[in-house]
Amino acid sequence: MKTNARASSGAGHSPDEPPDPYLERLCELAARDQWKLEELDWSSLDLLSLPELFRQTAADGFAQLLWGERTAELAASRLMELLPDGAARTFIATQRTDEARHVAFFERVIHLLGCEGRTRPSVQRLMREVQEAETPEELMLGMQILIEGIAHSLFLEAARVVGSFGEGDELDRPLQALKTVIGGWMPRLLARDESRHIAFGLHALRQSIPRLDRAERLRLEEKVTLWGALVLEQARDPDLVYGVGVDGEEVCRRLIDDLNLRIGQVGLETRIAPLKAA
C-alpha cells in the first residue's frame, strides 16, 4: 500500500490544524448511537417457518451484505493506520466497531434462516478491489461511498418492501419476524450507522479531493469506472431481490442514482452508467 505523507494527511487533520466541528459532531453521534446485538429480542424471531426457497433467497441476499460489512471492517482498520491522530481517526475507530457489530448481526440472521448464504463472484471481486485500495481517498471512495452507500440504500429499500407484506395468513408470525429484522432493526440501527459513515466519507473526500494532483484524481475517476462496472454487473442480474417479490430492476436503478449523486457530491466527474431497461 502506498502511504506517502500527502495521502496520509489529506483525508484527516494534522495536529496543528484547527478542530473540525463537523467531524467532532459525527464522533459525538457515533458515541451516542452505539447499540448492542444482545439487546435485540432474537428469541422472538421465527424464520424457519418461511418456505425454504424464500429462506434460501433471503440468506443469499444477506450474504452479499455480510461480505460488504466484513470488507468495510477491514477497510476501516486499514484507514486507521493511514490517518493522523484527530477526529477523523477517532470516527473511523467507531466505524470499525459498527462494522464488527454489523457482521455479527448478519451472521445471526443467516443462522436463523437455516440456510448457507452464497456470495456472488462479482460481489467478492468488488470487495477485494476495495480492500486493495492504495490510498485513504480510494479506501473512503470504495468503503464510505460505494459499499456503505449500497448497503444504506438496500436497507431502506428492503424496509419499504417488507412494510407492504400482507398479514393474517399462516405465515403471519414468520413474516412479522422478517418485518422486525428488515423493517425495524435494519433501518433503525444499521442504516443509522451507515448514514454516519457516508456523511464522514462525503465530508472527508470533499476536503481531500481538491488537494490531489492530476494523476491522483485521475486514478480515483478510474476507480469509479472499474468499481461501477462491478456494481452494474450485479444490478443486471437482480434475481436475489426478485426472489422475495421485489422489482429488482427498479431497486437497482434507484441504487445507482443514489451512488451517482454521492460521487458527484465529492467532486468526481465519472458516473456509473444507468441501468437500461431490458
Image (tube, grey):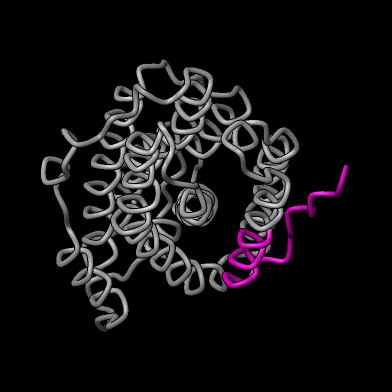
Residue sitting farthest toward the right: 278
| Picture residue at 35% right of the left edge, 43% below the top | 176
Residue 1 is situated, as x and y percent measured from the top left of the image, at 45, 38
* For residue 71, above or below residue 122: below
Residue 167 is situated, as x and y percent measured from the top left of the image, at 43, 46
Q: Quadrant of residue 16?
A: bottom left
Question: Can residue 138 be seen in the rendering of this structure?
Answer: no
Report whether 238 appears left or right of 93.
right
* Residue numbers of the magenta segment: 257-278
Instruction: Pick whichever, 70 or 240, lies toward us.
Output: 240
Q: Name the quarter where the C terminus is drawn.
A: top right
Report whether 257 appears left or right of 150.
right
| Picture residue at 43% right of the left edge, 68% below the top | 204
Residue sitting farthest toward the left: 39
Instruction: Pick whichever, 267 or 58, lies toward us.
Output: 58
Magenta-span inclusion, residue 275: yes
| Picture residue at 26% right of the left edge, 59% below the top | 89
* For residue 57, above or below residue 271: above
Residue 228 is situated, as x and y percent measured from the top left of the image, at 69, 46
Report whether 5 appears left or right of 91.
right
Instruction: Pick whichever, 59 or 268, lies toward us.
Output: 59
Magenta-span inclusion, residue 230: no
Q: How many marks?
A: 0
Residue 88 is situated, as x and y percent measured from the top left of the image, at 29, 64
Question: Can residue 146 be seen in the rendering of this structure?
Answer: yes
